[in-house]
Image (cartoon, helix red, strand yellow):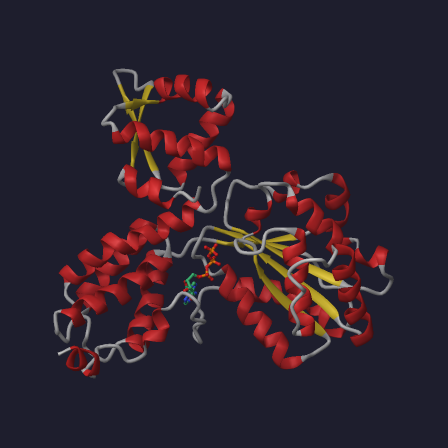
Amino acid sequence: MTKDLLMWDETIFRDPEVFETDFIPEQFNFRENQIKELAFKIKPGMSGSRPLNTICRGLPGTGKTTTIKKLFSEIESHTQRLVPVHINCQIDNTKFAIFAQIYHKLSGKSIPASGTSFKTVFEMLCKIILDRNIVLLVCLDDANYLLYEKEINKILYTLLRAHEAVKGVRIGIITVISDMDINLMEEVDMRVSSVFRPDEIYFPPYTSDEMKEILLQRVYQGFYPNVIKSAVIDIVVEQTMKAGDLRVGIDLLKRAGINAEMDARKTIEIDDICRAYEVSKNIHLKNTLKTLKIDEMDLLKMISDLAGENNEITSSDLFITVKEKLKMGYTRFTETVKKLDSLRIININYKGIRGRSRIITLRYEPDQIKENLRK
Ligand SMILES: Nc1ncnc2c1ncn2[C@@H]1O[C@H](COP(=O)(O)OP(=O)(O)OP(=O)(O)O)[C@@H](O)[C@H]1O
């Protein structure tokens, strides 16, 4: 019986890979300007000069990482002079871990887990750069993760001033930020800002038509013909726009396809999408929560606790508790509430004749939020 199930080779997926999170699409529309701009900043590195520093900014799922990965593979296919290194700061978020990753990329070797000082790693790295006469281009993706412990200052300072420590070393930096409220230049100290001077490249959210075209492309590549009707795709687009993150739509297609296959059907129906959405909608939540600062997470957890007890939450009552338990000031409190609203995690409704009293409600189940808060 098990054998029959596993060997059943009829599938509606032509290429399941296209629904994976690390899939790099061949066709990458609506980001031509960003690619062009970033290429222009990087270009000096191709002939041995230092690339210009940049900040790529945009909400989650707006194609920042894909743009960079595409450009990096283009660089690698044209030159060995400029060496791009992509760092995922969600995973590597200390100075040592980041430089160890860069060393690994350049040498193919890992740093021994213990006993190697940062100074040694740095010197080994600079030696490779000089010996091979290369220019380094480091992308700090999801750099918001470096802000928590102010680690960003140590990392940027070391990268930006490397040429002062070792003459001839050239390094360009791309930082990627998915939090629209963070002004990186305000977060770094003077020693860094005086040499960093990045240009910003903005990645706007996709419109509904753009989302539809991107998702249609995945459908053509990922499913066999006629697996999903146009009207059903429209619902996927609608749900994706509601969540505000393209990843939700891609995940939704994959899960809906699996749902249809589990029922041994050859077409994806609306019900498959609705069932899938219950899981896929968390992708956006997870991506959004990861961009929050610690005190913002604390406030959200408090709202979730109160909402879980079926309380009506007015902003004035909430502030009394917040002031007492989180020691948060009023300005920061209103800023954070506004941010949670703009990220579509909470809703703010105005109540009362003069509309002064604000009621806060969650857009998700309280438990769903608490489960996805990393802490
Ligand atoms: N223009 C596009 N065409 C096709 N697929 C796209 C496009 N933009 C984004 N995607 C897809 O959407 C998903 C998210 O893209 P990406 O990781 O590049 O976003 P991001 O802005 O870096 O997000 P985050 O800030 O959360 O890291 C990926 O699966 C990517 O393939």
Q: Which quarter of the frame holds ligand 1? A: bottom left
Where the C terminus falls, by quadrant? top left
Residue 162 point in image, percent of width and height: 79, 57
Q: Is residue 281 left or right of residue 136?
A: left
Residue 20 point in image, percent of width and height: 37, 68
Where the N terminus falls, by quadrant? bottom left
Seen at 62% across and 44% down, the residue is: 184
Furthest residue toward front = 115
Q: Nearer the viewer, residue 263 or 190?
A: 263
Q: Is residue 54 visible?
A: yes
Labels in figure, total: 0
Residue 213 point in image, percent of width and height: 34, 67
Q: Nearer the viewer, residue 261 or 236?
A: 261
Q: Is residue 178 left or right of residue 12?
A: right
Q: Is residue 108 left or right of residue 163?
A: left
Q: Image quadrant of residue 349?
A: top left
Residue 350 point in image, percent of width and height: 30, 24
Furthest residue toward right = 167
Residue 27, relative to residue 120: is it above or below?
A: below
Q: Is residue 363 visible?
A: no
Q: Nearer the viewer, residue 245 or 276?
A: 276
Seen at 33% across and 57% down, the residue is: 248
Seen at 85% across and 55% down, the residue is: 164
Q: Nearer the viewer, residue 39 or 64?
A: 64
Seen at 74% across and 49% down, the residue is: 157
